[in-house]
Each structure stands twice: as structure tokens, then as C-alpha cells.
Amino acid sequence: MENKKYKNYVLRNFRDLSQLQLLSDEEREAIGVVGQVLPFKSNNYVVEELIDWNNVPNDPIFTLTFPRKEMLSKTHYAQVKQLLDAHDEGGLKQKVHEIRFKLNPNPAGQEHNVPAIDGIRLHGMQHKYRETVLFFPSQGQTCHAYCTFCFRWPQFSGMNELKFAMKEADLLHRYLKKHTRVTDVLFTGGDPLTAKAHIMAAYIEPLLTKEYAHIRIIRIGSKTLGYWPYRFLTDKDADDLLRLFEKVTKAGKHLAFQAHFNHPVELSTDAVKKAIARIRNTGAQIRTQSPLLRHINDDPAVWATLWKEQVNLGLIPYYMFVARDTGSKAFFDVPLERAWNIYRKAYRNVSGICRTVRGPSMSANPGKIQILGVTEIQGEKVFVLRFLQCRNPDLVDIPFFAKFDRKATWFDELVPAFGEKEFFFQKDNLLGWHGKEPDFIWE
């Protein structure tokens, strides 16, 4: 395996890419304009091994990683371009800040998920569901490349007041020691695997002791297999990272590697196949997930191919998400009815071994809401929904109904069916809400 050196491309140096000479002046301009608002970063693996430059700008991986003009509204694009052309740095900074806050930078009430211990708010953690704690190691709050649909784009945009990140391993461990109903810890970001192996070990290894017997599953949410598989092959601490994975499994814990693959081409290189094999050899289990994205994977054949190839490589298809209502979502929007049809058409074209996947699922404020289907009840066309996860676990797996809306792309656009004023979980304060804020947290 070639000892491939990581080369980073960000907005200030992307003009050096020889491939950009294949783009029109307008397409190059769009990268500079949209990249002022939404973060841009790529690397030599994505540029050289994944993007088909003969199919740009319609190539799915190009669209996945390079800003396009349509990712901002016409008004916002014109405002940013005008200030750039005028070299008005102060005005540009102010306008970009204003636009970002109009793009719903903290979707699904993430700020309500931040727990506390001994009066200290733990801004690098979230605890929305009873059994699962999310931890954002501060050293992993970047990615090897940035997805243009990313719902955590404020992590990379200098919006420090909205950033989730924490250095203090001690606070994480104290919180988990106190909350013995927690069974799963999810390390997320950004991408936690942009951190060095010894930093991840400082967070993870204490959880392998008897004091944390209630922690049964260590999860790592990462796009690294898709964007930099050399992390597991030739990076200086690649072997150290894999040894850490082995320690987790040898300690009797389950290591769930939650890999993000948005298109089958990300599974096509020799590097990713070898990296997958090395991770699986540690005893870790790799589950896969992706949002459904217009212009990238809004085709049942793409999803069926994706799931089949994942299973061929020993991966477990896990989630098809609906893209969250933030950032450039308008560009990637897929109406909920179409999302369900894409899911079921792909699902029926794979064998049972691929049908571990669940979707389409919306990670909304109350919980993960799955679209089970569209049907007609008592003469009314409705969406059939259920919670896969919920702030109140007693509400999981109870079917409920929303009035059919052909244009709806997110749960907040739906209203209860049959003339009801509220969904069932909104009645009798079943989610523990007072006013607009939920009672928090799992004590």
C-alpha cells in the first residue's frame, strides 16, 4: 500500500487544484462565494480517487464536497458576492454571520440535549436518549473533508457560541459513572478520528474498567472510511488506533463503528476495502448510515447498490436519514413521500441480509421519527409514523399519523391527521415539556 500523505485543500488554497481548470468561471466563483458561508474543505484522496472530473459539476462526490451556487438562496448569494467584489471585509463578516443564523445552525433542539454535573454544563456532550450519551472530543471537531449537507456545519465555521466540544475526559467519566442507565457512548464530531490515537485512548480506555461495567457499547461516528481510509493503513498512528479498537473488544465491550457512506463510489477503492478489513479484524462491527440527498443519491438503484456492496464487504446497513433542516438543505431536499418511495423501492430490490437498514428517519426535536408509509384511513390520506428513538422511551414504536402533504420535507412541516390539534406525544406533556423547553435530563 502506497504511503499516501494527507494533503488538505481549504478555501484559501483551493485555486491551486489543477482539476479546477475544468470548471467554468461561474463554478469557480461559486466555490469562493458559498464557501464564505458554508465551510469548504477537501483532500487529495477525495479529489484524486473519488471525483469523476469528466462529470463535474454533476458528479455526486463533487457535489458532496464542493460548494455550488444553488446551495445559497439567490438573495444571499448576491449579497455575499457584492461584498466580496467590493473588498468590504467588515461588511462581509457581518453579512455572513447574519446569513448563517438564518440557516438554522442548531437543528432539532440540540442545545436542549446538553447535560450538567455538579452545576457544570457539559457543552461537549449531549444526552437526548436515556441509554446513549454523545461526546464531542475537542481534538476531533474537524473532518478530513466537509460534506456540503452537514448538519453540524457550525462546528467548522467559527460559530463558537454554537459549537459542541469538550477536552475534559474527567467530566465525561464522572458523568458516566453517575448515570448507570447509560449503556452506549457515541464519540462524534466533526470526526473523532481526526484526533490522534493516544487522545482517543485517553477518553476510551478508562471506560473498559470495572467501574464502567454498565457501559456495554462504544460507538464511533466517522466519515473517515469514506474520506481518508489511509487513517487505518498508513497514517503514523494507524496501528495504534487499531490496537485501541482491539482493546475495546478484548475488554468484552462491543465496538460499533458507525460509518458514513453517501454513494457507492466511496466503497470502490482498494484503500477503503483494505481499511474495512483491518477494522473488522479488530472485532469491531461496522454499521453504515447516510442521509437521502437530491443530486447525490436520490435514486433507489443507488441505494440498493450501496447496501449490497456494504454487505459484500461485511458491513451492516443501519440508517437512511432525511437530511436535517439546516444549512444547504433546500438544495438537497427530497419530499417525504418521495423519500419513502425511494426507500421501499430500494428495499424490495435487496435480499433479506441487507434489510437491517431503517428509514427514512428524521432526527427531529422529539426523537428519531421513521416514515412507515403513506396510506388512506377513513377517507383521509396520511403519513404513518413512529419513533425509533424518543426523549420519552415509553413512546418508542407507537404508530401515529400526520396529514399527507406532498411538499413536506421535514417533520415540522407536518400537522396531525384527522383534525387533531396535537400529535399524541404532545398531549398530557408526555415529553416533559414546559413551554418550549423539555425537562432535562436523565438523572
Image: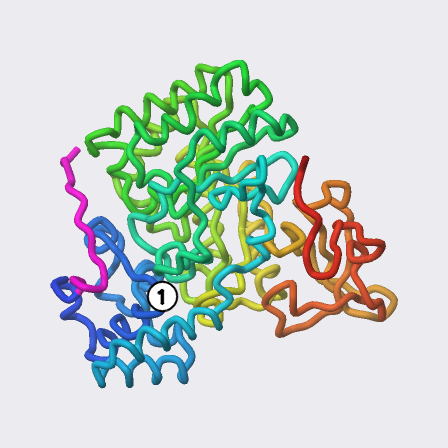
User: Circle 1 is placed at which residue position?
Assistant: 38
Left or right? Give the position of 265 relative to 388.
Answer: left
Residue shown at 27% from the left, 70% from the top: 31
Q: How is the rendered protein coloured?
A: rainbow
Of residues 122 and 287, which is closer to you in this image?
122
Q: Is residue 325 left or right of residue 68?
A: right
Residue 411 in picture, x, y percent from top left: 65, 63
Residue 360 appearing in the image:
no
How many numbered dots are placed on residues in this image? 1
314 horizontally vs 86: left or right? right
Point out the image quarter for the N terminus. top left
Question: In the current view of this chain or complex, which residue is farthest to the right?
Answer: 378
Residue 355, quarter of picture: top right
Q: Residue visible at 45% across and 21% down?
A: 206
- Our reading of the magenta stretch's main secondary structure is loop
Left or right of 395, for residue 280: left
Q: Is residue 398 above or below residue 55?
A: above
Amino acid type indicated by mark 1: Leu
Element class at badge 1? loop
The picture places residue 280, in percent across and down from the top left corner, at 39, 27
> Callout 1: few (<14), some (14-19), or many (20+) C-alpha neighbours within 10 Å?
many
Position above or below: 358 against 70 = above
Q: Is residue 218 above or below residue 20?
A: above
Residue 297 in the magenta stretch? The answer is no
Q: Residue at x 80, y 53 (%)?
A: 429
Residue 251 visible in image: yes
The residue range painted magenta reads 1-14
